[in-house]
Amino acid sequence: MTPCKFIYSIIITTLVLFGLQIPTHWLYLIFLAIGLVGIISQHSARLFLYLVMAYTLFIVFYAPLITLSASLAPQFQPKVISILIITLALSLLGRIFLYADRAETIERRGLKLILLAALITVFFQINKVLPYSSIAVFLAVATISYGTINIKIFSTTYDYKKRHIAIALMIFILLPFLNLIQLDNSKRTIGFIKYHSVWAKENFPYTTADWTLKSNYSYSEFSKILSNKYKILNINSEKDLNEVTPQCDAVIIMTPTVPFNVSEKKSIKKFLNQNGKVIVIGDHTDLYGHGRVINDLIQHAGISINYDTHFEPDNWHGLISFRNTLMGKVRPLSASSISVKKPVYVMAWSHNWVSEAANYNSPNFFGDLTWTADDKFGDFPMAITAKVGGGHLTLWTDSTMFSNFALYQPRMIQTIDHLINNGAFLSSVTYYYSFLIIIFFALLFFSNKHRGYLLLIIFFISSVASGLYLIYFTETDGYYDVKSQIHIFCKENIIREVPSNRDPELYSLSNLYSNIARYDLQPMWISENPSRCSTNQTCIWLTTYENYNKWNGYKPTHIVVIDDHEDISKLGYKRIFVNTEVTSLGLSESSNRELWVTSDSKHSIVFPETTIFTSDGVLDDYTIGNWWAAIEVSLYRKEMIKRFIDWIRKKEEINLFHYPKSGIVPGKKRAILIQSGKEDKELRNVDFDVLEYEKKKYVYLGGEMWGIFHKEGQKYFIVGGPETSDNYLKHRDFRFLISIH
């Protein structure tokens, strides 16, 4: 065993271990660099060809092995078992097929090393004695490679001439141009199957008329952006399905909850067989039975959506990457994982995420949303495209990110474009790849004369099947209405929505960002720091004071300072305390909000080239709450967001909001407070100051808490909860109902 051969083993094992975490374009560049060196160095040439084939085998067989290992041994990380199997298979294939003429066998030494490595790996996985178990896995798998390969992968008797390597490199360099095959821009007509879901609705527009979950969870904006780029045909009945589907290039099925009958399934299969594309979008925990409906519809494709909640255990802002794109990472909101039983093209993976089974005894079928011993842990497919007949089936497992409140977050629309337009070509190649690789290995087994050329053919097919060559951007052009588009510059975590049961990021503006679309505007996140905008574009920079002060590049006309830096006073601001009063109903504690304002009580300052607004304590998530609004949102929230929109549109500056006096005075009316479903027996005499706003009657109770005045027959009530509070941290789980007598 030479040191060079051992280095081969380590490099190969490293890529197998971490290949899915390396962006595709970096892998392409790494392999290309090794290949270029291979023109001069025979060792690099061997490594180059072997790496491509090894990584391809890993990509193709990883999904089925993950599914198998997760089912057989859920106590282990599925990734570990899959890597062990794949690495061993690669080693054995190299020995058996590439050295058939020499008929070499595995040495006893190698068998001992394999056994030792397997025992070490199992030990570390059971006991978790090392804080960095991945290191132990790496060493174990490297030992397996060392013991099995020895590493005489390529026959030393074959003369690797420079022209063979040059041919391989030419093929590899030209492969990116096959991108043109992948990107299918002919899909200009999309059918939307809408009559099979009681969940996915679009009949609640995202406007200021309704701030509740009805409009937040509606898909009206999703339909709007699709209609900007494609011709949309609504499929609202079985008759439409039969008549409209043949006119479509692609069909979208969003969280179907009503089972498809035999005739409908035949129509969809016929569409697939006629080169159509079907995009199925699911969600978490088989909610409303949508998972069972999806699996019944796609069972013939060899894939299924799992009845689980899929999340990154330590970070609810966990991101996933789409393969073969430069679009960056995207954040699912409440996804599920996918089981794979046949060769498919896996478009996106999660890495070290938790798969928590549905709990049908809890709201929305969520479990405890924490990593426990009975949960699965590892890498899971989250987006796949499978070849079905002459067409292709794409499955994505998170519909929430396409709902109104989340749609305009970073890379959501790029994800839509990716699901519609990509994956078909690679799914076809992957489908046939398992058969092709067997055929060519068989040819290698029986042929000695043209082994070099056969290796080049295998390399070509491997490169195509693994998708290493596809380095492309996804598009947003055409989805946005140019006249309504607003460019946003900021760090991504500032505008990312958080789950309703989690605290927001410090200085987060996610609620403000998501509500911009209510005013017929379309926010588009661009990058962290601003780039120059055209004169007809509105550009907003959300940044800290320190970054604003140090930035020497282009500054947009609208700047939002998000933090509470002490030097903000240098801009012309001063700190004040806003007394928001204490409610005598016991709904809140005393609250004095600290704000930055100008001398004339404005939150915004106009400079010659820019206008600046300080959002801390005014429109940050801690102040206006989150998107989860089942009743109504507070009057303050509506008013301040409206002022922000007017500021963007250059209509007016942002003025200080003056809270009304609560008007709670003893001796007027009797009220019974019902809190968290339990009646407070204490009777209280109160007087409410009722404010009419947008045809709704609001009651300010003090302490940044609002209520909605409601009449039912001869009875009068005031209802409220977290959404009617102006402070996110308070009253998170607090619901109240006040009966007035």
Image (cartoon, rainbow, N blue to C red):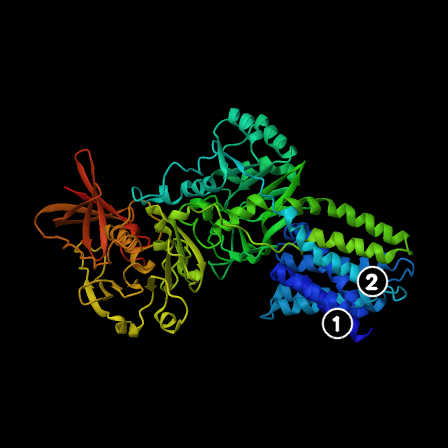
The vertical placement of 193 against 634, above or below, is above
Tag 2 secondary structure: helix
In the visual, does 235 lie left or right of 95? left
Q: Is residue 357 visible?
A: no
Q: Nearer the viewer, residue 431 or 289?
A: 431
In the picture, measured across the screen, residue 710 lies left or right of residue 163, that is left
**Residue 97 spot, x, y in % from top left:** 85, 56
| Image spot of residue 354 (x, y percent) | 54, 55
Residue 562 percent across, percent down from the top left: 34, 65
- Within 10 Å of disc 1 (Cα), the crowding (few <14, some 14-19, many 20+) is some
Q: What residue is pinned by disc 2?
A: 163
Between 385 and 613, the one nearer to me in the picture: 613
Q: Secondary structure at mark 1?
A: helix
Query: Where residue 690 appears, x then y in whole percent?
Result: 15, 46
Give the mark nearer the N terminus: 1 vs 2: 1
Where on the picture, by quarter, is residue 166? bottom right
Q: Which mark is residue 7?
A: 1
The residue closer to the viewer here, 296 or 523, is: 523
* Position of the N terminus by quadrant: bottom right
Task: Name the quarter where the C terminus is drawn.
Answer: top left
Q: Is residue 336 visible?
A: yes
> Which of these two is toward me, 131 or 331?
331
Callout 1, which amino acid? Ile
Three-letter amino acid code at the position of disc 2: Arg
Q: Quadrant of residue 242?
A: top right
